[in-house]
Amino acid sequence: MRLPGRRLVGTDEIRSCGCCGRDLPVTAVHELGATPGVYICRRCGLWAATRIGRR
Ligand SMILES: [Zn+2]
């Protein structure tokens, strides 16, 4: 039996950060444009941006 109006894909979805490996809600991670399917959390994104900017 299905429940209408409720989707499996939503805010409850979990993604693993490709950088630190932590499991985080999809709302807390960002998909990398260069590599679809790979997500990084905001913390790692900030860290990466800082690193890239400092080169
Ligand atoms: Zn991370």
Image (tube, grey):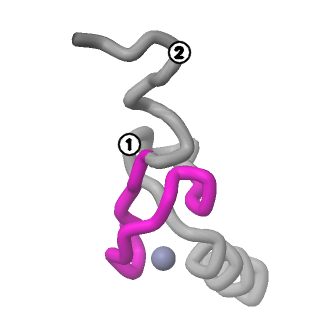
Based on the picture, tell me whether residue 36 belongs to the magenta stretch: no
Give the answer, above or below, for where 27 lies relative to 40: above
Q: Which residue matches tag 1? A: 37
Which quadrant would the N terminus be assigned to in this image? top left
Judge the density around disc 1: few (<14), some (14-19), many (≥20) Cα neighbours within 10 Å: few
Instruction: Please name the residue shown 53% across and 15% down the image.
Output: 5
Q: How many marks?
A: 2
**Label 1 sits on what residue type?**
Gly
**Percent position of residue 45, x then y:** 63, 72
Judge the density around disc 2: few (<14), some (14-19), many (≥20) Cα neighbours within 10 Å: few
- Give 14 or 31, whichever is nearer the viewer: 14
Could you tell whether 48 is left or right of 39 in the image?
right
Residue placed furthest toward the right: 53
**Percent position of residue 53, x then y:** 77, 80
Instruction: Please name the residue shown 45% across and 23% down the image.
Output: 7
- Give 52 or 12, whichever is nearer the viewer: 12
Describe the element under mark 2 as helix, strand or loop: loop
| Circle nearer the N terminus (1, 2) | 2
Instruction: Please name the residue shown 61% across and 53% down the image.
Output: 27
- Give 20 or 1, whichever is nearer the viewer: 1
Give the answer, above or below, for where 29 lies relative to 12: below
Q: Which residue matches tag 2? A: 5
Could you tell whether 47 is left or right of 54 in the image?
left
Is ligand 1 less than 8 Å from the beta carbon at label 1?
no
How much space separates mark 1 and mark 2, taking CA atoms?
26 Å
Q: Which quadrant would residue 17 be assigned to in this image?
A: bottom left
Describe the element under mark 1 as helix, strand or loop: loop
**Label 2 sits on what residue type?**
Gly
Is ligand 1 less than 8 Å from the beta carbon at label 2?
no
Magenta segment boundaries in residue numbering = 13-30
